[in-house]
Image (cartoon, helix red, strand yellow):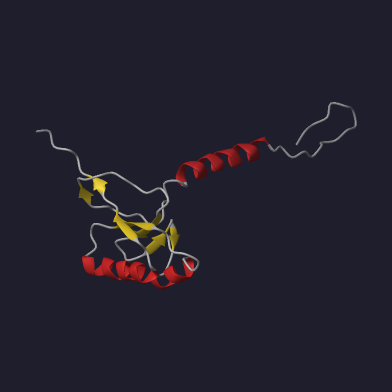
Amino acid sequence: MAMSTEPGAGPKAQINVTPLVDVVLVLLIIFMVVTPILRRGRVDLPSAQGSEHRDRSARVLSLTSGGSLFLDDEPIALDDLARRWSSAPPGSVLLKADRSLAMSAVAPVLRALDARGVKAVVLAVDPAPRSRD
């Protein structure tokens, strides 16, 4: 509330937006920092030595330890793969399967990809540290 110095004038009601702008900016910064951390479909990849070649045009299919399936960071059901690739299947798929999964959990995904006509499935791994000999 502002006060006028003129005689006979009463208090003037004004909204001070500076604290509101400060709070909004702080919230914006918090959301900008936290959003990249909240990754959906987090997969703990197995370690292996080998080539680090990756086809940049490959679609990324992630299978989490809880059995959730993600296509390019979007949740998807196994039955929906055919619908998503109705026009033409991708040439290759990068499959990120959590290291805690048994092969019996990965096999249905591989069968669905084969039935869909996917030509190549690349299994993603974390590169193992090279030993110093």
What residue lies at 35% left-to-right and 61% top-to-bottom?
A: 119
What residue lies at 40% left-to-right and 48% top-to-bottom?
A: 56
| 47 relative to 11 in the view: left or right | left
* Quadrant (top left/top right/bottom left/bottom right) for the C terminus: top left
Nearest the viewer among 98 and 66 is 98
Residue 15 quadrant: top right
Residue 108 vs 50, above or below: the answer is below
Nearest the viewer among 82 and 31 is 82
Q: Position of residue 100 (x, y in %)?
A: 23, 60
| 64 relative to 132 in the view: left or right | right
Residue 128 vs 70, above or below: the answer is above
| Residue occupying the far left of the picture | 133
* Quadrant (top left/top right/bottom left/bottom right) for the N terminus: top right
Q: Position of residue 43 (x, y in %)?
A: 32, 55
Residue 113 quadrant: bottom left
| Residue occupying the far right of the picture | 8
Q: How many marks?
A: 0
Q: Position of residue 21 (x, y in %)?
A: 64, 38
What residue lies at 46% left-to-right and 66% top-to-bottom?
A: 85
Q: Position of residue 75 (x, y in %)?
A: 43, 63
